[in-house]
Image: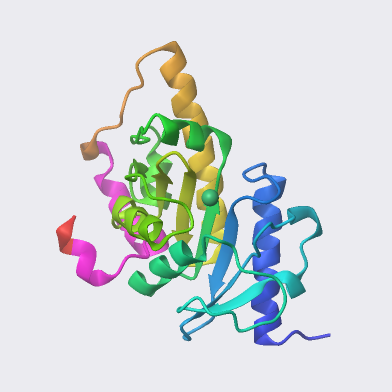
Amino acid sequence: MTLNKEDQLRLEVVNGAKAIFSKGLVEAGEGNVSVRNGKKEELFITPSFNQYNTLKKEEIVHLNFEGTPLSAGKLPSTEAKMHIAIYKSRPKVQSVIHTHSLYATTLSIVRKNIPIIMEEMYIFLGGSVNISEFGEAHTIEIGDVALKALGIKNAALLANHGVIVCGKSLDHAVKFAELVEKLAKMYWGALQIGKPNIISKEHLDRFQKLFESLFANYPRHMRKKT
Ligand SMILES: [Zn+2]
């Protein structure tokens, strides 16, 4: 059976959700995954009170950028406003993922950035993973603070809350969510046994091109500001 475009996108969200669940980045009822609906001002997002292990494509919610559901059934994730804010200000972003993964959220509680401790951070994420200001969950405010913390990068920590990542594909976003948690764990571990050494910018310049050509998804007009 061939799936229509809409069903393909719903299935993509299900697969992304199951991927982050199987990697232990979310527990039942928390976090959310979405994809943009092509050139339309619409998205497909996991439902509220999402049960990852039984999630089916019929439960994925089709929303427009006003937040109005275009499909019957489940209610959308309560963090849909944050996803929409990112799609609106970053036209190249095709997928957004939000998790409450353990080590990254731990760092978000002490409001620590993850500095550049591995070269791969620069290639995949565009640099350090910065902590946002506090934004109340389920509001448009958290979209604003998330965007500010992201800057031109692909990942940020949300103060006392978790992780937000965005990618040019769902596979990218899954990879970034996984990487942020791995880096948070390594940084946390390093802090326990000594003073982490941060890689200096001069060693990273050669990775700039790789980030720009492979994973960067920020709009061109932001380039000079950072
Ligand atoms: Zn959350």
164 lies left or right of 204: right
**Residue 204's quadrant in the figure?**
top left
46 or 191, which lies in front?
46
70 lies left or right of 38: right
Q: Residue at x 37, y 65 (%)?
A: 217
Please, is residue 105 above or below residue 51 in the view? above
Residue 222 forms part of the magenta stretch: yes
- Check the picture and name the quadrant holding the C terminus: bottom left
> Residue 21: image x %, image y %?
69, 49
Q: Residue at x 71, y 87 (%)?
A: 4
The span picked out in magenta is 203-223
- Identify the image's colour scheme: rainbow, by chain, secondary structure or one colour: rainbow
Q: Residue furthest top?
A: 193
Please, is residue 133 above or below residue 85 in the view? above
> Residue 46: image x %, image y %?
64, 65
**Residue 75's quadrant in the figure?**
bottom right
> Residue 93: image x %, image y %?
43, 69
198 or 78, which lies in front?
78
Q: Residue furthest left?
A: 224
> Residue 197: image x %, image y %?
32, 23
**Residue 12's quadrant in the figure?**
bottom right
Q: Residue at x 56, y 78 (%)?
A: 63
Q: Residue furthest right?
A: 1
Please, is residue 169 above or below residue 5 in the view? above
Residue 96 forms part of the magenta stretch: no
Q: Residue at x 44, y 20 (%)?
A: 190
73 or 165, which lies in front?
73
- Check the picture and name the quadrant holding the N terminus: bottom right
Number of numbered discs on residues: 0
| Magenta highlight: main SS | helix
212 or 40, which lies in front?
40
